[in-house]
Amino acid sequence: MHIHILGICGTFMGGLAALAREAGPRVTGCDAGVYPPMSDQLRALGIDLIEGFGADQMALRPDVFVVGNVVSRARLPDGNPKFPLMETILESGARYTSGPQWLAENVLQGRHVLAVAGTHGKTTTTSMLAWILEANGLNPGFLVGGVPLNFGVSARLGGTSGSDIGVGAANGLAARSAPCPPPALRTPPLPAQSAPPAQRPVFVIEADEYDTAFFDKRSKFVHYRPRTAILNNLEFDHADIFDDLAAIERQFHHLVRTVPGSGRVVVNGLEESLTRVLGMGCWSDVRSFGSAVCDFAADGEPNDFVVLQGGETVGRVRWNVGGVHNQLNALAAIAAAEHVGVAPADAARALASFENVKRRMEVRGTVAGVTVYDDFAHHPTAIRTTVNGLRRQVGPNARILAVFEPRSNTMKLGTMKAQLPWSLEEADLAFCHSGGLGWDAAAALAPMGERAQVADSIAGVMDQVLAQVRPGDHLLCMSNGGFGGIHAQLLERLAPR
């Protein structure tokens, strides 16, 4: 079996590639403009990467092409297709499928799927939940849109309860007579004592609401059919594919529709949008967290708090993770883990050793008394919660210099530019990379006065930062892309000569 993945370096497709490689098939893939950590992970797995989407890749003759949502029918200014390989696949009648569909039919089938959905915190909460299950002996499979530091990889098959993972027939559908993976690649069955009676093998997945593929405009998460679903939060995002918040709420309701009656929906009680989602109909057990009246609540600071269930103390979380948002993420993960038999006290204990996710408040280094952080935040709410988390960590007197680029499709459209001053309220200074934007970043940040500066190049941003930074400062770099390697460049230029 050979699968060739188009858009392999995206966080989702890269994780899918890792799962497929572990299951046994030969895996190759292509992409453009790759950057770590996914490219490093794929090469470490021995997966061949091809730069670009050239039609000559048809010569690989895979059994199925798995198509990521980065691929489209777009044309270049000269009229040629932007993705010639896809055009050739369509012309030739070769077999192809989407990433979420391939995953659902070849990996998730027969497992208890725990899906983590929400505008913010999906990656971190998915990682927390996977670690809770791992620490309590459930040997979970998982696919995370990042690299959890506890595991060092973004995806793995986990326990299969003695049954092999289907590796797909040549048409990319679930294999009914496909050869089993080589014995060395099979995962041993779960020990009987590690899960409740009749428990299926568990799989934790980050459930993204973005669309599946150019030929399937449903949200990715409708393919996963979870038995446990976390609805972490919900606000407007992805302005490139959704007209308004109501359109996203409808997609979340489609996810709720797929949860069976014996399943559980874990919902953030602070979110009016999620109240509306459940108001459209819910046929499963519901557990709430976060609000004044809810099933799971926290009492204490984000780095040391008591977990309350129904008002009674059931555990305590002491860890090195900051931010109110992560406190809420922890409650969601604890409530979901309970559904597969992990007591809240045991879940809370497991979080003490949770190491967070690469590119989530990751310290890249400290030079000349200046600490440089890397974070994935890009939506205004995520920027605000990230800055707040750092502020709580470093105290009111330390200076935070926020360095960011509005790189996501939503931010490039300028839909949320008016929220940027609000999102940066707790930063002492802000530096924005405005290259590639179709709107005036300086005007959007004008309410911040001299606290905000804008440059249209990475080099310009660095010059501005270096002119202002001083020992003891915290440089918080935020982007959902590689940010031109600004973290390493700042550390190099800060180093004494």
Image (tube, helix red, strand yellow):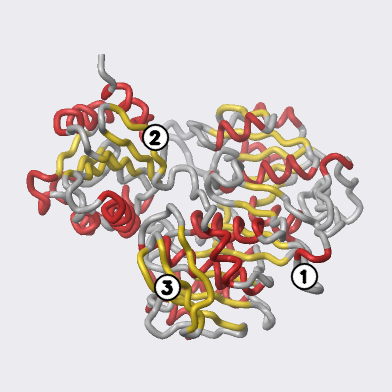
Residue in the image at 64% along x and 75% along y: 259
Q: Nearer the viewer, residue 301 or 285?
A: 301
Residue in the image at 87% along x and 57% along y: 162
**Does 284 sit left or right of 372 as displayed?**
right
According to the image, label 3 marks what residue? 298
Q: Residues within 10 Å of mark 3 (few under 14, many from 20)?
A: many
Residue in the image at 47% along x and 73% along y: 307
In three-dimensional space, the C-alpha distance between marks 3 and 2, rounded to whole angstroms, equals 30 Å
Is residue 414 shown to the viewer in this render?
no
Tell me the amino acid under the disc marked 2.
Arg
Q: Are marks 3 and 1 in contact (CB under 8 Å)?
A: no
According to the image, label 2 marks what residue? 364
Tell me the amino acid under the disc marked 1.
Gln
Quadrant of image for the C terminus: top left
Is residue 443 shown to the viewer in this render?
yes
**Does 332 sit left or right of 484 as displayed?**
right
According to the image, label 1 marks what residue? 199
